[in-house]
Structure formats: C-alpha cells, structure tokens
Image (cartoon, coloured by chain):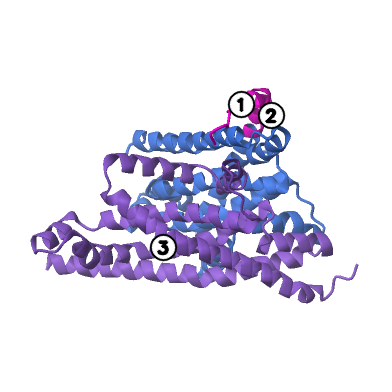
C-alpha cells in the first residue's frame, strides 16, 4: 500500500469534516447562550417549583454521560413522532446540553452579585428590569466570562461524541479515512493537531480573562478597604 | 405518546448482562482514575521542583491533553499506534487515553493546590530534619490534595461519565451493552431510563462518598 503523501490528498476531506464540527459547536453555543441565559434568569429569580424543576433537569444533564443524552435525542424523539436528520438531532442534543450548562454559569454569575446592589438600585428608583440590565447583569457577565470561554472549548471537544452516531463530523470522517487508507497514525496526529490549533487560543484567552478578573477583584477589594 | 405502553420485561432478562457491563465500566473508571491521579500528581511535583525545561515539557503535555477530545486520544492509541507496530487492547487504549487526558487537568489542579500550601511549612519541615520525600509525603501533599479535592472530584466525575466513550473501541461497558440491548429489543425508552439511572447512581454515589470523606477528614 502506498502511504506516502496521501495525507495531503485527503486533507480537504478531513477539513470539511472539521467544518461540520465547528458548525455544530457554533449552533449549540449560540442557541445555548440564548436558552441558557433565559433559564439562568428563571433559576435565579423563579419560584420554588421552577427552581426544583430546573435543578432536577440540570442534575440529569450533568449526572448522565453526553453520549447517553445524544442517544436519547436520536432514539426517543422518534417515539414522540419527531423525525430529524442525524446532523439536526446532534445539534438538538448538543444545544440541550449547552443550555443547561450555561444556565448554571448564568445563575452563578447572577448570584455572585451581592443582593445589596439590587436593593440599592431599587431604592434609587430603578425598575427591576432596569436594575438588572444596568447594575446586576453587567457585573454578573464579568464573573461569567472565564466559565463561558471554558464552556466554548468544552463544546468544541464534546461535539466529537456525535461521531458515535454516524454524524459526518471531523472524527467520523477521520475514522472512515483510517479504515480506507490505514494511515491511523498520520490521520490521528492531524486530527489531534487541528483540535489543538483551534482550542489552544481559546484556552489561553480563558486563562487571561480569569487572571484579569482576579486582579481586578483584588484592586476593587483594596479600594473598599481603603 | 398517548398509546405508549412501558414494557420492562426485556430488561429483567438482561440483568446479568447489565451487571457485567456495570462491572466493566467501574473497572475502566477505577483504573483510569488511579492512573490519572498518579500521572497528575507526579507531573505537578515535577513541574513544581523541576528546572525550567522540565516545567516547559509538563506544560506542553497539559496543553496537548486539554485542547482536544479524549476520543481523539483513544483513536490515536487504538488506531494510530498499530502503524508503529504496537497493538494495545481496546480496554487499555481506553483506560490509558482517559488517564492521560484527565491527567493533564489533574496536573493543573494539583499545581494549584501545591501553590496554596504555605512555603514556611516546607522550611519548618527542613529545619526539623525531614527529607524532601518526607516533607512532600507528610506535610505538603496532604494539604495540597485537600485544597484540590473539590476540583479533583469534578474531574473524577467527568471520568466516570467518559467511561461511556470507550464503547467507541467496543469495550463492553454500559453504553455498549445499552445500544446492543436497544437494537435487540427495540425498547429504547425503557432501556434509556434504566441506563441513565445507573450512570446517575454511579456519579452520585461517588460524589457523596467524597463529600463524606471530606467531612470526616479532620482539617490538619
């Protein structure tokens, strides 16, 4: 078997698979941010029943492997008469997962803002929505940034799970090409490098945001003390 | 969903298979958790006390691990190493991939824990005549690990869930048996509920055990 130079020949094919991976990640993060923020606000301000319900949901999402959740979407939605293509099912499953993990981040961010901030804003005559928009949420967003960046990296990696369900993303295409060309070492090294090239800058950004937040926290604390 | 009737009979028949699948998953989890913990602690100590070149090597390892999915490492070991004449079994490919991948996270966590231990403790130990290994074993590591226990627990729980990924290499653990059962019985909904519950029980029991240990262990 001629193995020399053929990695170059299949590179466009592999990169198209990587495109699908990034598309799935992009969709699930974008939708996850929307639903996650809504759910996070509901969790932080909702009634007891709502909080219990959301707690049960997030415990299920966090306590059960992502593969099992993707499986649920692939095989249980048809029971309800909802039939989707493999890629759409994968997008639905990843979006559900992203929504609940981002919900936890948003709730944590909101709860990290001292209650006195909201009370002070309300006593100054802000409406609840106004106080939230101009006082609480901007501060919450600051403390959420490191977790959100880390979550983005996590989602890029987590999409690889849907390759087990025949979704033609990066890992699935790569495995298919290994079976065809037997270049396991070269192809997997390529895949490993490609993931690292995309994720490393984000990981570094996450670390930067986190250390900046910590420094700022210290200076603001020093300001209060002085 | 109106006309759906739950039918759990196929699951009672499959209990022996489910039991052995749970045992395999637990074996994968325990082996890879222990290996990852060893790798992470060793790498953290090496980075803490090594020269700048070893520290560089450790951070290259950490970045290589946490910027790609653990599945990539599984396939690299299982499908890539045969090109070099090595043929690891599915079980060990999965276990080693999980251990190396999560070892990277544990390295960072334990390094953080080591940094949180007061330097004067090391000086005090030295002045009492303790050797380097005694200082690490008796003074530094117990404190550093206690500092890092919450973060370590999160990684270990991720690892328990990630044992399901070894089904990609046909390791006959829970998820593998689950898909096999679904295709042979077609009771996807019932089987899903049972297996999700098993995973949930494994992660919850593990988390509660650590919590108990955390409470029981006296601080200092």
Same chain shared by disc 3 and disc 1: no
Decide if residue B68 is on the left or right side of residue A164. left
Locate residue B42, reporting x and y percent.
54, 54
Classify mark 2: helix, strand or loop.
Answer: helix
Q: Chain of mark 3?
A: A
Q: Chain of mark 2?
A: B
Classify mark 3: helix, strand or loop.
Answer: helix
Name which quarter of the figure residue A3 lies in: bottom right
Q: Which residue is mark 1?
A: B7
Mark count = 3
Most distant residue in the front direction: B2
Q: Colour of chain A?
A: purple
Instruction: Indicate which disc, 1 or 2, sits on the residue closer to the N terminus.
Output: 1
The nearer-to-camera label among 1 and 2 is 1
Camera-side residue of B182 and B121: B182
Residue at 48%, 36% in the rendered image: B206
Residue B23, can we see it? yes
Kindly check if marks 1 and 2 are in contact, taking CB atoms under 8 A apart as contact. no
Question: Label 1: how many residues lie within 10 Å, few (<14), some (14-19) or many (20+)?
Answer: few
Residue at 75%, 46% in the rendered image: B89
Q: Which residue is mark 2?
A: B17
Spatial CA span between label 1 and label 2: 18 Å
Camera-side residue of B144 and B124: B144
Camera-side residue of B45 and B88: B88
Locate residue B148, reporting x and y percent.
41, 50
Point out the stretch of residues depicted in magenta: B1-22
Chain painted blue: B
The nearer-to-camera label among 3 and 1 is 1
Spatial CA span between label 3 and label 1: 42 Å
Q: Which residue is mark 3?
A: A148
């Amino acid at each position: 078997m001629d193995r020399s130079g053929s990695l170059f020949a299949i590179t466009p094919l592999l990169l198209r698979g990587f495109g699908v991976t990034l598309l799935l990640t992009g969709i699930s993060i974008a939708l996850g941010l929307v639903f996650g923020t809504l759910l996070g606000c509901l969790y932080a301000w909702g009634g007891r029943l709502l909080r219990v319900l959301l707690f049960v949901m997030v415990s299920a999402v966090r306590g059960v492997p992502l593969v099992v959740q993707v499986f649920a979407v692939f095989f249980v939605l048809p029971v309800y008469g909802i039939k989707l293509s493999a890629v759409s099912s994968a997008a639905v499953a990843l979006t559900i997962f992203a929504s609940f993990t981002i919900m936890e981040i948003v709730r944590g961010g909101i709860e990290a803002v001292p209650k006195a901030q909201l009370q002070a804003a309300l006593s100054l005559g802000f409406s609840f929505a106004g106080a939230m928009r101009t006082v609480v949420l901007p501060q919450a967003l600051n403390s959420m940034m490191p977790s959100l960046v880390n979550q983005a990296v996590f989602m890029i990696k987590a999409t690889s799970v849907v390759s087990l369900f025949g979704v033609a993303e990066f890992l699935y295409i790569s495995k298919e090409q290994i079976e065809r060309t037997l270049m396991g070492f070269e192809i997997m090294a390529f895949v490993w490098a490609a993931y690292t090239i995309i994720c490393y800058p984000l990981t570094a950004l996450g670390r930067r945001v986190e250390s900046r937040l910590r420094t700022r926290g210290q200076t603001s604390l020093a300001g209060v003390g002085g | 969903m109106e006309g759906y009737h739950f039918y759990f009979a196929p699951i009672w028949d499959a209990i022996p298979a489910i039991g052995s699948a749970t045992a395999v998953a637990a074996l994968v989890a325990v082996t890879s958790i222990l290996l990852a913990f060893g790798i992470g602690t060793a790498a953290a100590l090496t980075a803490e006390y090594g020269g700048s070149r070893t520290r560089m090597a450790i951070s290259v390892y950490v970045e290589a691990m946490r910027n790609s999915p653990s599945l990539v490492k599984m396939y690299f070991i299982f499908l890539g190493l045969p090109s070099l004449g090595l043929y690891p079994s599915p079980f060990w490919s999965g276990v080693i991939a999980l251990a190396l991948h999560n070892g990277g996270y544990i390295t960072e966590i334990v390094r953080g824990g080591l940094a949180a231990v007061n330097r004067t403790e090391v000086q005090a130990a030295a002045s009492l005549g303790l050797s380097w290994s005694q200082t690490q074993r008796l003074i530094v590591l117990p404190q550093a690990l206690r500092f890092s226990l919450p973060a370590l627990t999160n990684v270990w729980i991720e690892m328990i869930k990630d044992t399901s990924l070894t089904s990609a290499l046909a390791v006959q653990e829970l998820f593998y048996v689950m898909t096999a059962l679904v295709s042979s019985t077609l009771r996807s909904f019932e089987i899903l509920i049972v297996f999700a519950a098993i995973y949930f029980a494994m992660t919850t029991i593990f988390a509660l055990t650590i919590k108990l240990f955390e409470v029981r262990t006296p601080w200092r």
